[in-house]
Image (spheres, grey):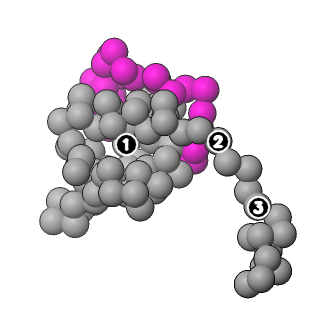
Amino acid sequence: CNEGCDNCKNPRNKSEGKDFVVNLLKTIDALNETQRSKHYCAFLAGKVTADIKAYRHDQHELFGVGKEKDEHFWNAVIRQSVVTGLVRKDIETYGVLKLT
């Protein structure tokens, strides 16, 4: 691109995401690798959904550990974790997140 593309001209701000990734991995492990992305996003953001109430995850000690960020942010953390190989989506169980 010779530094002429939009990504080079206007790079996105980067931030350290280690703590967020650690919270995600702890949550996936604590919930026994049984949920899909949407559930983890709501869980980390502290949003009570019908599924979270049904599983009583709103009573879990890690519930809302990342409530300073929204579900959209946590979805981005999940995507980056999948890209880097820390987490995988198990297609046989309809996208349940598994630790690698």
Q: Is residue 39 left or right of residue 2?
A: left
Nearest to N terminus: mark 3 or mark 1: 3
In the rendering, which numbered label is found on residue 70?
none
> Alpha-carbon neighbours of circle 2 within 10 Å: few (<14), some, or many (≥20)?
few
Provide the secondary structure element on which disc 3 rests.
Answer: loop
Judging by the rendered image, the residue that carries numbered circle 2 is 15
User: Which quarter of the figure has residue 5?
Assistant: bottom right
Q: Residue at x 18, y 36 (%)?
A: 32
CA gap, disc 3 to disc 1?
A: 31 Å
The residue under label 3 is which amino acid type? Pro
What range is drawn magenta here?
A: 50-73
Residue 64, position as x, y percentages in the image: 46, 23
Which one is in front in this view, the residue at disc 1 or the one at disc 2? Answer: 2
User: Which quarter of the figure has residue 93?
Assistant: bottom left
Residue 65 belongs to magenta span? yes
Judging by the rendered image, the residue that carries numbered circle 3 is 11
CA gap, disc 3 to disc 2?
A: 12 Å
Q: Is residue 81 above or below residue 40?
A: below
**Does the CB distance between marks 1 and 2 fall below 8 Å?**
no
